[in-house]
Amino acid sequence: MSTAAEARSYRLRWRHLDKSLFVWVLLIGVLLVLVINPLARLLWASFQDGETGALTLGNYAVAYGRWRYLEALGNSLVLGVAVAALCTVFGVPMAWAVSRTDMPGKGLVWAAILGTFIMPSYLGAVAWILLAGPNAGWLNRAWMALTGTAAGPLDVYTMSGLVLIVACYSFPYMFVFTRSALDLISSEMEEAAATLGAGVVRTTLRVTLPLTLPAILGAFIVEFLEAIALFGAPALIALPGRFQVMTTMLWQFFEFPPKVEVAAAYAMPLLVITVVLFWLQRRIIARKGFVALTGKGGERRPLRLGAWRWPMLGYCLFVTSLSFFLPMLVVLHAAFAKAWGRGVALDNVTLHNLKFVLFDQSTTQAATIHTFVYGGTSAAFALGLALAIAYIVHRRLVPFGGTLSYIAMAPFVIPGIVLAIGFYAAYTTRPLVLYGTAWILILAFTTRFLPIAYANSDAAIRSVNPELEDAVRILGGSRRLAMRRVLAPLLKRGLAGAFILVFIPATRELSSAIFLYTTGTQVLSVLLFDKSDEGNFEILSSIGLILVVITVVLVMLGFRLVGRDFMLKRTTA
């Protein structure tokens, strides 16, 4: 065969080769860097001697050879169970009141819960230090003024204080899971129970809540996992209170010189617990379909509470006051106060704190720029990667494409602090050294929130009938043309909301950033945590207020682009 004929044959084979195979290989390579390599290096490091590199079980012996390490593990388990139980007490009655009753003020309650979503838990911890710090906290000072005693009754630096704070910023998950289940239930069975003489309480306990039990149990597990993996609030409360949890102990393993191998061994039970409980949560949630047996489209009439409407509203406002109204009030006061301890007075109001944070302090300016550049880049990377994976999976472009979706969702079961240790172990040594650069934070944030991006991209791709793209190709257009002219216009609104939902947590992420930042890559969440040691709560509150205001602007943008319930829909995805 002539050279020209061979070239022509080669061009024909290349033209008919499905180029999506190359995309599939590229995506595997990206996921290898983002997900598989950090976890593999984390596991390897836990069995590796830090000096000789030999295999050993010594890291596990060190990690669990001291009582205080075991005590920290026990404290984390206690914290997780207590937080999940308190979240159930907070969230389930509120979800029932908003979804099933004629309680007034539902819009206000939902707005306060949304505000709780928006407020970072570590900022809430700062607010509660100002509210319930021993003697100096607002609530303690009010108690001492009213009773004439020399000390207040509240001490936020205790396990019970930590449980309350973490529960205040975790219960919205319980609310959303339970409300979503309640919204599926027709009121026909409740009306039948009422006809047979059952009161509101008995009907709720015997009919309504059993139907939502899978959702409640699933949310309970999510709350437990959230509590044991949290770093910011425990570090601000537990360390001054002289007790430890697993995440704060892991952080202390990274004090100079860092004990990466011991930290990896100590992180393994946290990873195993998370994986097992997440699997159990998915099994429970998978059975929730029976809540709709009465008909998803069935009529839902609100239960009439009579005089109990107002106590129910009072309970909802009490919980949201703990989680949002009181903390937000004290943050606003401290941010605009010359000295927060002087109380509310006109001569104590100043704009100096915000001016200092925004314009005068170079460290804060750099951290602000880093926060939003890293967050925006991570959100774009995560969304682009997730969209490519979802498209390949749902259009079945390659065999075994479903494997990509499992890997994309894997970071959901990896606590942020464990993921950070994996990135540290993987990318502080050759061949790819990223530590000390912005890229290690960007890639860690991308990995951390890839499941959010994938869940939304998956839903968006499923909503578009592939026949629309097939029509373009039948008329002679390429797949690229079909994606640009058909798919992209249909997806842009939903993907805009998905971008916001990845960008918001990326700008507030602390668990990963605290292990991976250096002096030149500090972000606002780390700066806020670092400044907590200085005790300058006016500056702390100003930094937190900036984060909250920007988050509110983004949420309002999401409302405008996608709809007022875009956060509710995607939280339960």
Image: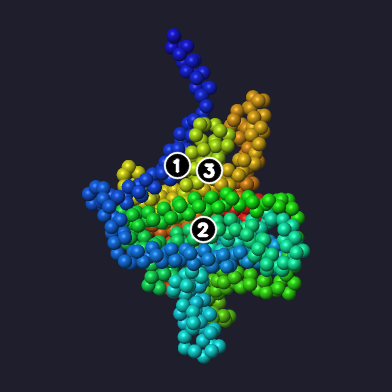
Q: CA distance from mark 1 to mark 3?
A: 10 Å
Earlier along the polypeptide chain: callout 2 or callout 3?
2
Q: Disc 2 or disc 3, which is closer to the eye?
A: 2
Q: Which residue is mark 1?
A: 31
Q: Nearer the viewer, residue 228 or 208?
A: 208
The quadrant in which residue 367 appears is bottom left
Query: Helix, strand, or loop for circle 1?
Result: helix
Q: Quadrant of the N terminus?
A: top left
Residue 374 in sight: no
Residue 389: x, y in percent?
A: 52, 39
| Crowding near the residue tagged with mark 1, few <14, some 14–19, many ≥20 C-alpha atoms within 10 Å | some
Residue drawn at the location 77% of the way across and 63% of the way down: 195
Q: Which residue is mark 3?
A: 386
Earlier along the polypeptide chain: callout 2 or callout 1?
1
Residue 438: x, y in percent?
A: 42, 51
Residue 90 marker: none
Q: Which residue is mark 2?
A: 221
- Horizontally, residue 44 falls left or right of residue 480, namely left
Q: Amino acid at mark 1?
A: Leu
Q: Amino acid at mark 3?
A: Ala
